Structures are given as structure tokens and as C-alpha cells.
Amino acid sequence: NDDSLTEETQRLKMMATIGFAHPLLFFRNKSIDKSHNSRTKRFSSSSSSSARPSSSSPSETFHRTDNGQVIHKDVLSEGIMKKKKRVFFLDVSPLCYEGNKPSSHAFGHWVSLFFSQVSLNDPVIAVIDGEEGNQRRRELLPSYKSHRRSPIPGKYSKRPHQFVDEVLRKCNVPVVRIQGHEADDVVATLMEQAVQRGYRAVIASPDKDFKQLISENVQIVIPLADLRRWSFYTLKHYIAQYNCDPQSDLSFRCIMGDEVDGVPGIQHVVPAFGRKTAMKLVRKHGSLESLLSAAAVRTVGRPYAQEALTKYADYLRRNYQVLALKRDVKVEIQEEWLVERDSSNDSEVLSSFFSTLHG
């Protein structure tokens, strides 16, 4: 849902202005594409260990080679990343909206840009919410995504995802839908399997839930409605924006809540507990559970914060259960999903799709 961009769009637009966001890729002719898409052999999972994010310690900022050459760790890490093949995970459902309204035109627009400017011939795995996928979370929190409407009304209302499946499969994209599971959990599970095989995973989605997965091997590419383009968001961008590890993102959101998904934050019961307080405490303690455990035995903040963390600990732990992405869905990534995507049908399939919409 594009509402999930409300909080992030201004930050990302600012980042694009100062050079953080990935530059817009332009359409390429076939001869350039063929040259660009000649691939190196894939890293085996046993030889694809990547450098960890640099710490504040100067001794860990550089890497010395056998011949004595000193290389900045960021450069070393980027070199390793470039050797890894990418696999994209396309979170389909949020792309089927324009603002709050279901829109097949929005789906066509974002998928067309995605294929032509972002994924090119890299493998793409599309994931769609399964039937009753959010039931488990709604049992924990009835307000969870309670405002969501079924996508694509009108001519596609009887089988809302039928045309999505048809378009994606004709463009040689496998479509994964697991009964009883949300797309977010399926993406998290498949992403981890891809990384274990030595791939670099890129999640295409406006959903900020995926920030908890960001690492040196996992990036996000976000559709920016105001700029009408996709923009890459990486570990480097996250640290520049929040000055903390992405693993802390989930803990921070458990405290502040997620209005888009109907998850109330601590400020609903303790109004004085704001973003600055939450970020300061999460940075200091690293995780929600560490923070709650510390607050149970000693003072960790001002009286209002201390009382909130002790009195509403179960409230915050429930938020964690709702917002944490699962990585144990019973689905296995298939080898045929990881081959270079044949994009020769894209233009014809998408042109036919738009013609049908306009007809």
C-alpha cells in the first residue's frame, strides 16, 4: 500500500537529492543488454563470506592484502558484492494500489518500470499473499491490517490475482503464493535461502517491514510514487539515515508501532514516549528484549519511560510477534527460479495488458 511510503518518501527524496538513492537507470537497446548481461560464474556459498559492516574501531576499517596493499573495507565489500549474482523478490500486492485505492494501472506501471530499469535479465521471484495469510497476526492483534481492501475491483474482482499471475508468468517470472502465509514471511524465508546459496537478494517493495532484513547481502528497491521511479536502499543508506544497525529497526518499530498495518505504538498509552526516546534506548540496548530485561531490574531512562517499559512490556512483546518477519515458512527455492530471466516477451505482454485495461 502506498501509505507505507508516507513516512519514508520525504527521507528518500532528500537522500536522492544528496546522492544516496540509486541513480535512475535508462532503457537500453538490445545490443547493450546482451553485452551487459554476460554473467560471471556464480559464487559458491562456501566462498561467498562477505565482510561485516565496519565498526568504529580504526583497526577494522581497512584490510591489508598479502602484498601489503591497504584497501578500505567498504571497497573490499563492494568488490565482493559485485561478484555475487542478484535475485529479486517482487512483493506484488502493494504494487496493486494507487494511494489507498486498488489499481491495476499501478501494477502495470510499476512492473513495467521494474523490468525495464531495475531487474533487467536478473532472476525475479514474485510473491503474493496467501489466503488467510494474516490470520495468525490478527489473532494476536485484531486491528492488524483491518483496513485493507481486496485489490483490483471491477472486472478482476472474482479472481483478483488471475491477471497478475498471467502477466508475470508470461514474463517468465515464477509466482509463489503459500496458503496461510503473508508474502512478507515467504519473501523473508526465500531470501535467506538465496543468501545461503551465495546470491545477493534484492526485495522490491514499498513495505518498510523489510528494513529489518537489510544486510550486506540484502537490499531493498522501493517504488517512489512522487518521483515515479524505483530507488535502491542499502545497508549504507540505512546507517546514514538512522545511525544504527538494521537489526534494531524491528525493535524501534515495536515501540513506535505501525499505523499503516494497524499496530499501535507505546505513545497510544504513554504520549510522552516519542521517537527520540525510543531510538536512544534501542541504540543503547540493541534489541527490544534486552531493553525490557534491563528495565525490569534497573532504571534505563526517565520515569515515564521506565514506567512504560515495565508496565507495558507484554504490549511491546505482542507488537514484536506481529511485526517480526518469519523465516521458517515451508517453501523451498527452486533452482529453475534462479536462472537468468528471458525478457523477450516483456514488451508484448505489457503492451497487451495496458491495451486490455484501456479497452
Image (cartoon, rainbow, N blue to C red):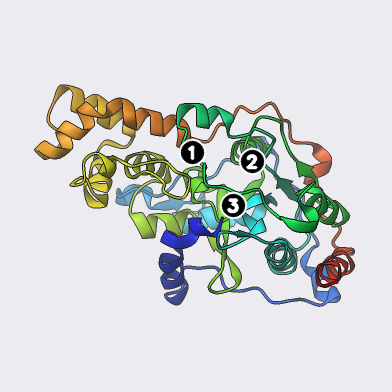
Considering the numbered disc 3 on the image, is that residue within a helix, a strand or a loop? helix
Circle 2 residues within 10 Å: few <14, some 14–19, many ≥20? many
Mark 3 or mark 1: name the one nearer the start of the chain: 3
Q: Would you say 20 lies left or right of 50 here?
A: left
Which numbered circle lies on residue 183? Answer: 2
In the displayed structure, 313 sits above or below 81; it is above
Q: Quadrant of residue 267?
A: top left
Q: Are marks 3 and 1 in contact (CB under 8 Å)?
A: no
Q: Residue furthest top?
A: 297
Q: Are marks 2 and 1 in contact (CB under 8 Å)?
A: no
Q: Are marks 2 and 3 in contact (CB under 8 Å)?
A: no
Which numbered circle lies on residue 316? Answer: none
Considering the numbered disc 1 on the image, is that residue within a helix, a strand or a loop? loop
User: In the image, what residue type sits under mark 2?
Assistant: Ala
Q: Quadrant of residue 78?
A: bottom right
Q: Name the residue at 64% across, 41% down.
A: 183
Q: Is residue 150 visible?
A: yes
| The C terminus sits in image quarter | bottom right
User: In the image, what residue type sits under mark 1?
Assistant: Tyr
Which numbered circle lies on residue 80? Answer: 3
Q: Which residue is mark 1?
A: 144
